[in-house]
Amino acid sequence: MTVPNTAADEAAEVGIPAIPGNPIEGRSLGQIAWGRLRRDKVAMVSGTFVLLLILLAIFADVITHAMGLDPLRFNGNLIDQGTLLPYGARSGMSLSHPLGLEPENGRDMFARIVVGIRPSLIVALAATALQMIFGIVIGSVAGYFGGWADGFLSRITDIFLAFPILIFLIAIGSIVPSQAFGLGAYGVHLVVMIAVIGIFTWAYQARLIRGLVLSLRDREFVDAARLLGAHPRRIIFREILPNLASPILVYTSLAIPANIVLEAYLSFLGVGTPAPYPSWGQTLSNAVAYFQVDPTYMLVPGIALFLTVLAFNLLGDGLRDALDPRAGR
């Protein structure tokens, strides 16, 4: 077995002098995008924050147990029974309770904030995956085949775009059974939120994917695949969609924070994560009655939700800039 000649060897054979310096190495699109992303300090900080949130959600029980905290445990001895507020300033913040206590019942805010990350991320990530699957499949079929298929699927998309998703979610959430499919109230509400959000919010992604597929379906590489007798399914999933990986990734990163807000909104209205399980939206709802006398109770989950959504949005913007071949950075 012979070793193929390098470019330098071939140049030497024909008498071309070697140019001093390091050889030029080719880089893939992924390497180029990663290099751009690493230079974006805002995106890297946001990505680190998102990674930290995911780790906190995974190890929330371990962290709270190690600190001797329980998000469901009442601490009535730390509550002033006259005002129903925690003893001390700023909701009773201390070394034992870094973010203070809830008014009236004394549950630890740090434990509830950390454990409350979990339902937000579970619903957001799973619902986003579901809506992207629906959106990619329906948008690709409509854009590639055109004609009656495009017309029919576009009308279905218009119906879902006009669908009052929030009203439907509130109505469904209010009639969810306390137990179903072997799951308790917590699991049932999570499954229902994931299913409803994923099934009824894919229309935006479908419309975007349809437009991108329309711009690629008559390109030369697609025509070549057709001439070779490739099945339409293979053309869509092996030829067209790989070229849309960058925008799909960006759309996904921007859909996640929207679904985090939607889950918090539903929990705020009382139809999301059921009490007494921790949820940022539920905590914000409970804090409304105490805002004037104990604003810290609302500020802690509010800031957590704000920073989480901001980090995902900034990371999505950074991914868009890094994956955009026309970016000048």
Image (cartoon, rainbow, N blue to C red):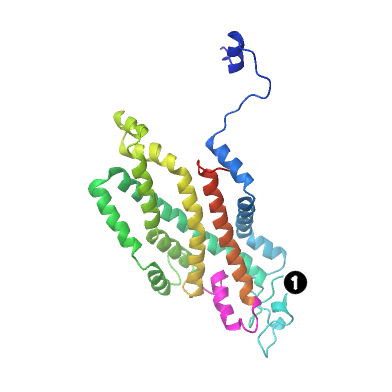
The residue to which callout 1 is attached is 96
At a point 69% along the width and 83% down the height, the residue shown is: 79
Quick check: is 285 in the magenta stretch? yes
Mark 1 falls on what kind of element? loop
Residue 57 picture quarter = bottom right
Amino acid marked by disc 1: Ser
* Region in magenta: 273-296
Asked if one can make out residue 279 in the rendered structure from this viewpoint, the answer is: no
Furthest residue in direction bottom, as rendered: 82
Looking at the image, residue 264 sits to the left or right of residue 42; the answer is left
Q: Is residue 4 above or below residue 154?
A: above
Q: Residue 28's spot in the image, x, y percent?
A: 54, 34
Q: Residue 120's spot in the image, x, y percent?
A: 54, 63
Quick check: is 288 in the magenta stretch? yes
Looking at the image, residue 138 sits to the left or right of residue 102; the answer is left
Q: Nearer the viewer, residue 179 or 149?
A: 149
Q: Residue 174's spot in the image, x, y percent?
A: 42, 75
**Dot 1: few (<14), some (14–19), or many (≥20) neighbours within 10 Å?**
few
Looking at the image, residue 229 sits to the left or right of residue 260; the answer is left
Q: Is residue 234 above or below residue 11?
A: below
At a point 43% along the width and 67% down the height, the residue shown is: 180
Residue 55 picture quarter = bottom right
Q: How many numbered circles does the render carry?
A: 1
Q: Residue 104's spot in the image, x, y percent?
A: 63, 83
